[in-house]
Image (cartoon, rainbow, N blue to C red):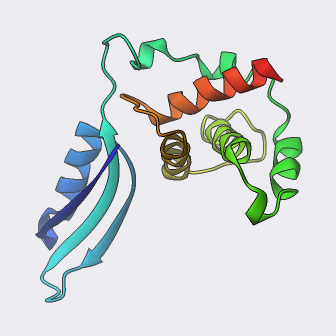
């Protein structure tokens, strides 16, 4: 994962954001005007697009259905998350939050939704917390880690 900073003409902003999105797996793009107001300045977290190589390639990750087969309901998961105050949120809390958000984006949680950008940001947070090197889809890393965690409990 890495961060990209771009400064471009206002007219080019949408085209540059689309090109970044096409080239990389990106998170939330934060856009600001430059000091002179004539250009856009934006920041984005990104990762390389998935490859078909071995290792952390997208094809090596579990499917969402397999990863979340034994997951609690979204209601139960949200209650568990809300029951942990800010100072007591360790890896398990961040893993479960990333996983439930991933499930929401995938439409696996009736009545609950989330944005892809939020799910991707949470996946990056877990990757950073684990100090992991992930190539490809960061949300697939969440699925892999959740499946491992679920099978050990």
Front residue (pair 144, 22): 144
- Residue 6 lies, in percent from the top left, at 18, 62
Residue displayed at 77% across by 24% down: 150
In the foreground, 63 or 133: 133
Tell me: 130 left or right of 51. right
Q: Quadrant of residue 51?
A: top left
- Quadrant in the picture for the N terminus: top left
Residue located 51% across and 17% down the image? 61
Could you tell me how many numbered marks the image carries?
0
In the picture, residue 91 is in which quadrant?
Answer: top right
Q: Is residue 29 above or below residue 20?
A: below
Is 147 on the left-hand or right-hand side of 81?
Answer: left
- Residue 102 screen position, x and y as percent: 61, 38
Image quadrant holding the C terminus, namely top right
In-front residue for pair 104/76: 76
Front-lying residue, 96 or 37: 96
- Taking the image as shown, residue 100 lies to the left or right of residue 49, namely right
**In the image, is 126 to the left or to the right of 93?**
left
């Amino acid at each position: 994962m890495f961060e990209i900073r771009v400064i471009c003409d206002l007219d080019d902003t949408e085209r540059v954001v689309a090109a970044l999105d096409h080239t990389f797996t990106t998170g939330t793009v934060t856009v600001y005007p430059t000091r002179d107001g004539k250009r856009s300045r934006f920041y984005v977290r990104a990762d390389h697009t998935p490859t078909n190589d071995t290792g952390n390639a997208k094809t090596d990750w579990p499917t969402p259905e397999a990863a979340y087969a034994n997951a609690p309901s979204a209601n139960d998961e949200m209650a568990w998350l809300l029951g942990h105050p800010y100072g007591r949120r360790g890896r398990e809390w961040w893993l479960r939050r990333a996983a439930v958000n991933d499930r929401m984006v995938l439409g696996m949680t009736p009545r609950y939704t989330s944005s892809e950008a939020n799910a991707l940001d949470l996946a990056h947070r877990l990757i950073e917390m684990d100090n992991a090197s992930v190539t490809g889809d960061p949300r697939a890393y969440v699925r892999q880690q959740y499946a491992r965690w679920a099978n050990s409990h």
